[in-house]
Image: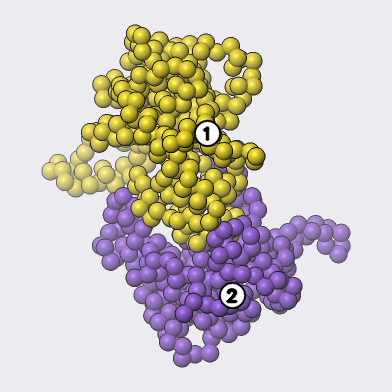
Chain colours: A purple, B yellow
Amino acid sequence: MLPTQKTPPKPNLNDLTVLVYGPSKIGKSTWCSHADGALFLATEAGLNNLDVYQVPIATWDELLAACKEIAEGKHAFKTVIIDTVDNAYRMCAEHICQKFKIEHESDLGYGKGYALINNEFYRVLNKLALLPYGLFLISHSQEKEIETRTGKLTRVVPTLPDKARKIVLGMVDIILFCDLEPTTGADGKPAHRRVIRTKPNTSYEAGDRTGRLPEVIDLDFAKFVSAFTQGLAAAPAASTAPAAASNPTATAAPQAKPRAAAGPTR
Amino acid sequence: MTERMTTTYSMWNLFRNCRKAAHWRYVLELVPLEKDRHLSFGSLIHECLEVWHRARDLSAALDVIDRACPNRAQEEDQRRVWHLATAMMRGYAARYAQEEFEVVALEKSFEGEIINPETGAASRSFTLAGKVDGIVRIGDEHFLLEHKTAAGVDAGYLERLWTDFQITVYAYYVEKALGIRVAGVLYNILVKARLQQGAGETEEEFAVRRAELIAKSKTGKSSAKRRLPESDDEFQARLAAKYAEPEMFHREMLYISRDQFATLRAELWELTQAFLDARRRDVWYQNTSFCFQYGKPCPYFALCRSGGSPNVLENFYERRPPHEELRAADAERLSPAGANETF
């Protein structure tokens, strides 16, 4: 019953859970639309100019229904994209408020409403992450002032409430921050280059559990896939849970699919 | 022989409560990136009390608060802390204008051996260090002075003081390291008032309220006036009245028996052995009963929940050497001012 071999790193993007966030109109949805077999669960408008498969989602129940169909597997989609996860969270909050007949989540007192929302939200995302499809979560970005032990700093973070953000960042394999990098144009004038940042910094949140991605990549899906594939070829065979447990700062192999089961389920 | 690891009460207490959390903090040296506001308030009051008991100069204590909240005019959080801390210290100075004790030392640091109770030999792996809020003399006896800020003092709170592992540790080591017989502890408890500064109502809120009153009124009129925000002076006056109430400050004196020292030595030694075993096998199990102490998640909850995800670790935590509470003590030991302390 016990394994005789280490779990190999997932070689396929379709096995990973990815959070993509950044400012409006930078091209997050367009970037995700190039994913293999992409299906958008569109919780907000904004896909009108994209030629994509999409399910408009207006309520949490509609999202659950779409997820149920996806889980049944009678389709050819390979990547599920929730656009945006921020709106999905709001729908989840409305769903809980309706279920408990309250106007606001704080009405239940002692943080119970927030906990119910977070549990329901995590349950569904976790279940989606466990399916044999890639899961891309899109979020907008916001600046947040953080008071640290040594002073205040302003950080760009996804626009999810704090606890939900911690849940999402903890379950994804890759956190991609879409940003504009100042550069100089061909005409010598200041210009901006659209990039993806993959490593955390004091100024923004990002991360790459696969350890395959360079720190900065152009916001171009083909270049991203190329970097991921090259990183896969270059990466040594990584071990899984034991190494991560004893030294979590070491780059651990992506293990979202099997590991996500550790969270609460209903 | 390798260098011995300096430990504190906080470390052993955390290890006893949750080995996983102790591993995050004391082995991997991680702390949350964001500062805990509740802990910051307690630290601020501790600093004020040290200043107050050193010279009994209220303005100096209030200066500490002013410096800690430089942006109180603009920032809600700082304004709330400033109001509460200022009223608390003013109330404290008024309540304890005359003290029954004589201050012997304040913020006194100590370091000592952890002894194997069976052999009497010192641990080759650990030493124990700490810092007491104060040492005071009442008559012929010495007591540790321990400041605490609390949301309230009820029966459960007072009962828990009897099982305070920290004070037994401190008393034992103060005796050993500083050569003073400690008779007991004087708990100095300051209660945090739950009052909020009145925010008033907007024009729109007032219009809605007034319309509701008019709808209920038989005359179709209302004399209601818009509620204006409470001024700083008005709020301070309300807080001052609150801090004049007897239950906002409490002192509890407990005597420490020599039997407690024997129990402490045995428990502390057992903890060192358990820690060595955990470190040797690299097994740090999580005590899930400890995840939500005092109604809020443990600082490492997000990390444990994610299974130690590097994404969570790198985005929400930073590396800080442990025992931050001792660093000020180190500075004190090195500074000429520290050498002049009255102890």
Real-space Cα distance between discs 2 and 1? 43 Å
Towards the viewer: A151 or B278: B278
Residue A175 percent across, percent down from the top left: 60, 64
Residue of label 2: A6
Towards the viewer: B16 or A85: B16
SS for dot 2: loop
Towards the viewer: B8 or A34: B8
Q: Residue at x 66, y 59 (%)?
A: A199
Asked if one can make out residue B216 in the rendered structure from this viewpoint, the answer is: yes
Q: What amino acid is labelled 1 in the image?
A: Ala
Q: Which chain contains the residue that carries disc 2? A: A
Residue B311 percent across, percent down from the top left: 58, 60
Q: What amino acid is labelled 2 in the image?
A: Lys
Quarter of image, res A245: bottom right
Towards the viewer: B325 or B264: B264
Residue of label 1: B122
Q: Residues within 10 Å of mark 1 (few under 14, many from 20)?
A: some
Quarter of image, res B42: top left
Q: Which mark is residue A83?
A: none
Quarter of image, res A178: bottom right
Q: Are marks 2 and 1 in contact (CB under 8 Å)?
A: no
Left or right of residue A105: residue A209 = right
- When the figure is inspected, residue B104 is found, relative to residue B2, above or below; the finding is above
Q: Residue at x 58, y 49 (%)?
A: B28
Q: Residue at x 35, y 19 (%)?
A: B183
Asked if one can make out residue A22 in the rendered structure from this viewpoint, the answer is: no
- When the figure is inspected, residue A113 is found, relative to residue A260, above or below; the finding is above
Q: Which chain contains the residue that carries disc 1? A: B
Left or right of residue B23: residue A25 = right
Q: Residue at x 49, y 90 (%)?
A: A75
Extreme-left residue of the structure:
B218
Residue B169 percent across, percent down from the top left: 42, 31
